[in-house]
Amino acid sequence: MLSFFTLLAYLYKGWHTGFASTFLYYILLTLILYESLLYFTSFLKMEVMREISSKRLQAGGKQFVTIKMKRKLPFPLIWYAAHERWPENMPFVPSQIVFPWFKKEIDITLEIPQLARGVYELKEITIVCGDLFGLMKLDKTIDRLDQFIVYPRYDLLGTWSVKDGQHSGHASIARRHSDELTSVVGVREYAYGDRLSQIHWKATAKNHTLKTKEYEYHVSNHFAVFLDTRPSAYPDNAAFEKAIRLVASLIYLGKKRQLKYSLLLEGALGRARMLEGAQEHDFFRVLEELARLRLDGEGSVASLVGQTLPQLPRGTHLVIVTSQVDRSLSVLLTDLAQKRTTVELFLASESSADDQRMWIHKLQGSGVILHRELA
């Protein structure tokens, strides 16, 4: 279109020689040269990179994504903007326009606030440029994959206390000592952390290796957390996110107290799967699993917990996190409590259904430690 008007101005200049026609012709000719230079040099040998401020952060935090452009020919009269193809679960991020003038290196930093738990993949960068008069707009898309992960927060238990009367003070998981045990039923190999009073000296002398007494009710410094991932177990997604935050907080609490822990989840084909840990890298492996977790479970809590019980050490402290209590779960937890297994049930939300209230009421006084503070 600009070329057409320039041609008309040239014909007009030839037909009517004068200052106005000559001025108009050279103005349009200058614009054509300017637009041509912009078209051929704006992306010529340009290098585009992306820098992410943090590969790992907690939910609610900020992420800064910097698009770096390096030009070979710094054409001054131009503007640039950068766009990302953001994932669906990411909040809206406005783009920025910069005027680089003679700079060869251009940085555009985009701030992403209040990130939710999850794994984010950035796949494409789109660079847009244009002239100063709005006559031309060009874009170029570069495929570049970067990934970062947003862990759930794990600070929920810092100020959380129980109010149901069965357990007071801050929610905690502590080691129990051997003076709570009953009769000795055998011996086993010595394990690091066993107290001197637990060593079976006669068996040690006979076998020339340290042996530890094994009691009828064996107590370990191990705890297991089961998280219900069925959509029917939570009234909304916010309750599920609160449950995930609670699980992460429990695992964090166990790590700080140097306890062994297991995270129990529903796996493929309705089978239970277990992630065990005790070290720092195990904790972040569990957090990554929680970051990827979706509300897509199908199996009942009682069935899945029953599958994992034989795999857990005797005396394991069992924690269940859900919002739905049915007959099978109530019977299982009551039975475990009667067998002197310490069981805690955390409710991520309060149910209004009469049948659930009935089963929750039956758990009170059964030995199961019931937490309703999250509801």
Image (cartoon, rainbow, N blue to C red):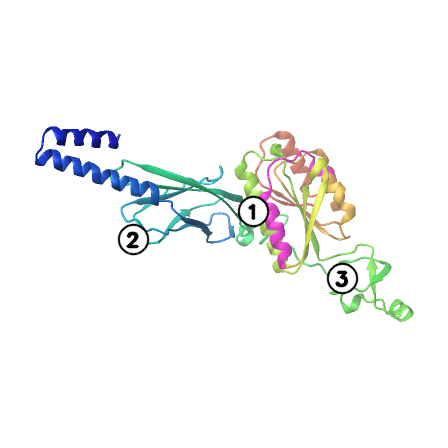
- Percent across and percent down for residue 311 are 77, 48
State the residue position of label 1.
245
Question: Could you tell me which residue is drawn at 62 percent across and 46 percent down?
Answer: 289
Is residue 186 magenta-colored? no
State the residue position of label 2.
102
Q: Quadrant of residue 231?
A: top right
Element at label 2: loop
Asked if the residue at tag 3 contacts the one at tag 2, i.e. Cβ–Cβ closer than 8 Å, the answer is: no
Q: Quadrant of residue 139?
A: top left
**Mark 2 vs mark 3, CA separation in Å:** 78 Å
Give the label, 1 or 2, closer to the camera.
Answer: 2
Q: Quadrant of residue 114?
A: top left
Q: Amino acid at mark 3?
A: Asp
Question: Could you tell me which residue is drawn at 79 percent across and 68 percent down?
Answer: 197
Q: Amino acid at mark 1?
A: Arg
User: Which mark is drawn over residue 14?
Assistant: none
Residue nearer the viewer, 126 or 135: 135
Residue 13 relative to residue 120: left or right: left
Residue nearer the viewer, 216 or 138: 138
Is residue 300 magenta-colored? yes
Asked if the residue at tag 2 contacts the one at tag 1, i.e. Cβ–Cβ closer than 8 Å, the answer is: no
Region of the chain picked out in magenta, as a range: 280-303
Furthest residue toward right = 206
Say whether residue 163 is visible: no
- Crowding at label 1, few (<14), some or many (≥20) Cα neighbours within 10 Å? many
Does label 1 or label 2 sit earlier along the sequence?
Answer: 2
- Percent across and percent down for residue 319 are 67, 47
Does label 2 or label 3 sit earlier along the sequence?
Answer: 2
Compared with 326, 45 (above or below) is: below
